[in-house]
Image (spheres, rainbow, N blue to C red):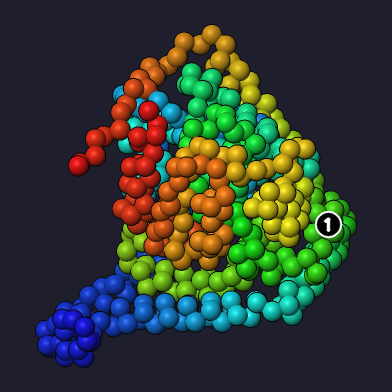
Amino acid sequence: MSDTPPTIPSQDEVSDRVRKEVQRAYQRRIKGLDFLLAERVHVGAMEKEVVYRDGTAMLYRYLPVEDEIYRVPLMIVTPPSNKGYIFDLASGQSFVEFMLQRGYDVYILDWNSPRKDEASLDIADYVDDFIAGSIAKICEITGEEEVTLGGYCMGGVLALIYTALNSPGPVKNFVSFATPVDFTHMHLFQAWANRDHFDVDELVEELGLIPPELMLGAFDLARPANRTAGQINLWTNMWSEDFVKSYRMFDRWAAETLPVPGAYFRTQIKELMWKNALPAGELQIGGRTVDLGSITAPVLNIVAMHDHIVSHEATQPLMTQTGSSDRKEIVSKGGHVSLVAGPAALRRVWPLIDDWLAERST
Amino acid sequence: MANQEFDPFRAWQDLVQKWEIEINEWSGKMTENDQFSAMMGQATKMNLVAQKAWAERMETMLATLNMPTKSQVEDITERLDRIEDNIERMRLAMEQSGKPQARPEPSRTRKAPKKPK
């Protein structure tokens, strides 16, 4: 297939195009002003209620919309550094809405900003208290003894550790969204938190809670042009109501990055990042060794092709080291966030998740 | 491939995208060496020291002006958070104790749709 040079448009086509661009430029100015003056954008499409709360942990149940639902409830653990509403931004781009309409009973384990007195919370607290407590609550509400446990990014790591430590147990299926397991492939974070130069103990002792700016700085380093390119794209598309609405929702979510407890951060850096203890089978949580091989539940690994935070390689122990004989991988176009939010995921990824999960949820 | 019309809007978007990829790739290469890690380590440490010094100075200044400091506002926020937590726990406890269920639970009997052969 060879490219042919662009044809020269006719005079009418040029004037049409110019008229359209003038209208857009006009719209940009009006909507640009609206954008600057706008209040905080509303997020959340589906009705929900808090069913469990323990300090920083908050478990939401999204109210089922179907009269007949699958037996096994679905619980997703969101990363402790981010708000869980990324799974339910707005109608038409909400994973929660999609799964409710497909007949699932959906729960999201979300996080509040930890308080100063929660700076000592460690991975063990997240796994043994918050996830365990949430699953117990779901079992109590539903009368079921099994759940599908999922997690996104570091939420996926916590869910994975829980599943490994409690297998066989209440986790019927494990669903991973961009979950890093082999941290040797987290190149930017390895460079940022290089053990020869990064004094994590000093940081934790001085700050207690690790502020979001510290982590956002690392993300900006990974993709320094993203912010500026995002602003340029926003201005270019300012005439489009849908684009601006989506931009503002994502922008709000990114700006609402949460601080994380120092102890949790220290374990993440020392054990996961420096020792790569998870795939090595050397991670100790509450005196128990986390063995990925003990996971026998079906595993679904969902990865984004252009994820600049969690690469495909970083997720691979899920496919090679878990003890399950039922493992499937979905590699989708797009980046880290576009797996869990946005209209592209609705078309490309979520129907595949439903296909896989439906027959394992009865 | 069919003849393409020249679209300045599309060309502009392509240009921005190309620039974004190039800068990000350049940054990726920059961050691969040990020198970068050392610089980041130093920058994080200096940032920490500067933040601490600035916070201490601001605390003194605001105290002199008889205004609440950041740590005092944080303390109040934490107390409010605790109150909110307790109210939420009470609400959940009250809901569990005896209140009839507001909504009927859907039946958990759904079957996976049959796949076409």
Using the rendered view, name the quadrant where residue B47 is placed: bottom right
Q: Secondary structure at mark 1?
A: helix
Within-10-Å neighbours for mark 1: few <14, some 14–19, many 20+: some
Q: Nearer the viewer, residue A252 or B65?
A: A252
Q: Does the image show residue A327?
A: yes
The residue beneath circle 1 is: A201
The residue under the point 54% across, 8% down is B98
The residue under the point 42% across, 77% down is B17
Q: Does the image show residue A33?
A: no
Above or below residue A226? Residue A9 is below
* Residue A199 as seen in the image, left or right of residue B30: right
Q: Position of residue B77 (x, y in %)?
A: 71, 41
Q: Position of residue A39 (x, y in %)?
A: 48, 53
- Quarter of the image with the N terminus of chain B in it: bottom left
Residue type, mark 1 in image? Asp
* Residue A325 as seen in the image, left or right of residue B57: left
Q: Nearer the viewer, residue B21 or A118?
A: B21
How many numbered markers are drawn? Answer: 1
Above or below residue A82? Residue B22 is below
Using the rendered view, name the quadrant where residue A66 is placed: top left
- Quarter of the image with the C terminus of chain B in it: top left
* Residue A22 as seen in the image, left or right of residue A134: left
Q: Position of residue A164 (x, y in %)?
A: 61, 39
The residue under the point 37% across, 64% down is A31
* Residue B63 as seen in the image, left or right of residue A76: right
Find the residue positioned furthest to the top: B98
Q: Nearer the viewer, residue B42 or A277?
A: A277
Q: Position of residue A128 (x, y in %)?
A: 68, 34
Above or below residue A1? Residue A236 is above
Check the residue under mark 1 and report the chain it is in: A
The residue under the point 49% across, 82% down is B22
